[in-house]
Image (spheres, helix red, strand yellow):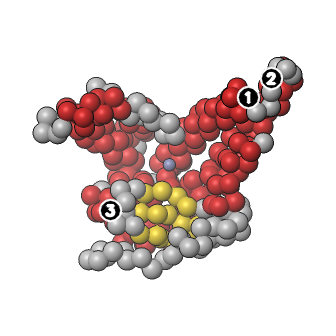
Amino acid sequence: MVAAAGFLFPVFYDGIFAIPLDLKDDMVCVGYNRQPLQAKVKALKKKIQIEKNLIINEKCNSGIMRALGNSILPGKAGILVDPVVVSRLNEPRQEFSIAHELFHIKLNDAVTINLLAAAVTLVAAIALTILFPHLPFFSVTMQWTPLLVGFVAQGAFSKFCEKRADLLALSVCSEDAKNNAYKLFEGLRVLHKQHREATNVSILVSLWRRITITPDGDYRLGFAHPSFSERVRYLKPQAAAA
Ligand SMILES: [Zn+2]
């Protein structure tokens, strides 16, 4: 029960309360022109038909771009961006990345992923009680198995949602963006491969990279996203078709 409620927390945090403290539209990084990004978000929001006002929340050097909120629950929605990351992407790759994040909002992925994880956790807990009635309620098996099952379900469904957002993003993107989408992930794969093979780092860092990154440059512990190689595999044919 407690574990299932744990998965529900992000639903409310991301939805009804909508991160009121964090989600501001006024965090401009020094020397960064936000107009082009704002214009892209506005144009894609219209194309994807998101009714809510979208906020762009900038966090310098956070190294991420991700969707915040959803379109079904009341509360704010928007995207969290690192202007440094954005400035490293060419225009078509920016377009694809924004469209991807906007589809997470449009399809309420944050809500459904966590609701599903909570439901699976609850079902696993009930199933355990029925199948093993003699297990004490506070035993390690009873407490951790449902949570583990919930995490696996969350990971699998999250990967499905990521792929869906990738493919839907292509459906609203320009031809240029379609041709660039797979190159974005191919570039990341090559970068991580180089990171793994770098010799100018300490033995511990090198060891950690070898544990967490495959020889091909994919994350071994990629829990919520398809690997870079997999994303290249399904995005590349779309470019060829464009
Ligand atoms: Zn995503």
Name of the residue lying farthest toward the left: 200
Report the side of 90 relative to 68 (left or right): left
Which quadrant is home to the C terminus? top left
Foreground residue, 188 or 141? 141
> Looking at the image, which residue is at 80% across and 27% down?
136
Q: How many angstroms separate mark 3 from mark 2 (CA)?
A: 48 Å
- Residue 39, image x and y in percent? 43, 72
Which picture quadrant has residue 156? top right
User: Could you say whether the residue bearing mark 2 is in a helix, strand or loop?
Assistant: loop
Foreground residue, 201 or 167? 201
The residue mark sitting in front, 1 or 3, is 1
Report the side of 8 relative to 22 (left or right): right
CB atoms of marks 1 and 3 within 8 Å: no
Three-letter code, disc 2? Leu
Three-letter code, disc 3? Asn
Foreground residue, 1 or 195? 1
Residue position marked by numbered label 1 in the rendering: 139
Is residue 60 visible to us here?
yes
User: Could you say whether the residue bearing mark 3 is in a helix, strand or loop?
Assistant: loop
Q: Pointer 2: residues within 10 angstroms few (<14), some, or many (20+)?
A: some
- Residue 239, image x and y in percent? 38, 41
> Looking at the image, which residue is at 73% across and 36% down?
121
The residue mark sitting in front, 3 or 2, is 2
CB atoms of marks 2 and 1 within 8 Å: yes
